[in-house]
Image (spheres, grey):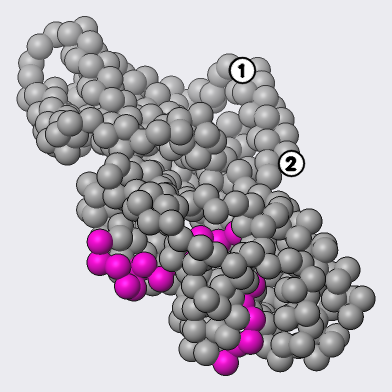
Amino acid sequence: MGAYLLEISYLIASVLYIIGLKKLSGPKTARSGNLWAAVGMTLAIFATIFLYKDENGKHLGNLAWIFGGIIVGTVIGWIIAKKVAMTAMPQMVSLFNGMGGACAAIIGLIEFPHALHAETPHTLMLLTIFCGLVIGSVSFSGSMVAFAKLNGNMKKDIRLPFYNILNTLLIIAIAAGIAFLLISDMPAEQKVTWVYALTGISLLYGILFVIPIGGADMPVVISLLNSFTGMAAAFGGFLYDNMAMLTGGILVGSAGTILTVVMCNAMNRSLSNVIFGAFGTGGAVKAAGGDGQQKSFREVSISDVAVLLNYASKVVIVPGYGLAVAQAQHVVHELEELLESKGVEVKYAIHPVAGRMPGHMNVLLAESNVDYGKLVEMEDINPEFSTTDVVLVLGANDVVNPAAKEDPSSPIYGMPILNVEDAKQVIINKRSMSVGYAGIDNDLFYREKTGMLFGDAKKVLAGLVEEVKAL
């Protein structure tokens, strides 16, 4: 009876995961989607604890350790989720990816000796263990490097000589190691030692895989590592014949893979180009003035911009990472409402990779109750720029850089961008003339119709609100 209830619980949990994932696709239902998935996970965990029995008919032991771990993990996760800023979401995703990968790797290390001492070690079982171990290890070490880069702990991209050849050799070594362990008849103790070596090589590969990748490609790498974690968890579910774990892993793995493909398409780059091209690094980087030419730009004041906005018929706001850093989502909504009260049409242009994660800007603006209908995707807003009086770019560099269309030598050449230069007036809000996340200069800043409005986005927007009110 207990076994049937356990399977039914896993089935219900799997359905809850799918419903939760479906709801996560929309900003209005995302919060409830999280809750549905969390209820499913809770059901799967407690069903396993209280209903699972081993071949001897015994329930799980060490309940004090299990519940102690759950309580500690819940408290830590709750605190992190409460304190993390929107700008630090990519780091948090990397950290959680890494923890999932580490869990999958540990499962492999624990279950391999058990499989060896089974009466009839099954090749498929061993292969499942190795796949979960290798993918989990790569995901863990790669995610930790990604976290260090995004968090500013690792500020320079490291590109070793012949790193592509080195990484290829490591992949061959991992595949050869797995094959050797499957066919070798060496003593079990020696095999365990080889498995630790395989884990070490996998961890090294994860590090070398991520350290040369920088700039705007990091979000793609994060979503790719997320898919790795899902696959590793799915192998764990297959190993334990656990439907809930298998379903959850497949959903995470497939969602991460789809997201990776979407982001690559948004940047007009192939996945192999992202991994082996090391975008945004090395000699491809051109800082402002780095080409030896002194360029001039036009600085504008808050009063100048307030007048432009007040007497415009149509304004498009382009939110970027600078807006997120300044936590200016509420004051930009206030400016939007103020302009609309004066008869100005206001929209937001959303690039697919605006900020540092897809959907980052949508969530940020939803926090301040911006009408979701005002958020316009790139394909739909680009034709409207030619009829726009003023474009206000808030802390976005790379997604409005015309070099993506005009300079074949640029590392972002071919990436779809927001065609803000088609508007009558372009106002760029930045803290300074420093380069953006991709590490390249933006010729848009030096064009005749562009005005540079320097300062923290939140303070600048607050100043604009006051000036527009006074007009």
Most extreme residue toward the right, as rendered? 470
Q: Quadrant of residue 304?
A: bottom right
Name the image quarter holding the C terminus.
bottom right
Bounds of the magenta segment: 387-409
Residue 44 horizontal side relative to residue 235, left or right: right
Task: Judge from the rendering whether residue 401 lies leftward or rightward of residue 213; answer left or right.
Answer: right
Q: Compare residues 152 and 264 and report the one nearer the observer.
A: 152
Please tell me which of labels 2 and 1 falls first in the chain.
Answer: 1
Q: Residue at x 59, y 46 (%)?
A: 89
Q: Nearer the viewer, residue 305 or 86?
A: 305
- Give the image location of residue 27, x and y in percent: 64, 67
Residue 396 magenta-highlighted: yes
Determine the secondary structure under disc 2: helix
Image mark for residue 65: 1
Mark seen at residue 443: none
Residue 278 percent location from the top left of the image: 28, 46
The percent position of residue 181, horizontal first and vertical second, equals 14, 22
Amino acid type of the residue that numbered disc 2 sits on in the rendered structure:
Lys
10 Å neighbourhood of mark 1: few (<14), some, or many (≥20)?
Answer: few
Q: Measure the alpha-carbon separation of dots 2 and 1.
A: 26 Å
Foreground residue among 278 and 442? 442
> Which residue does the numbered mark 2 point to in the structure image?
82
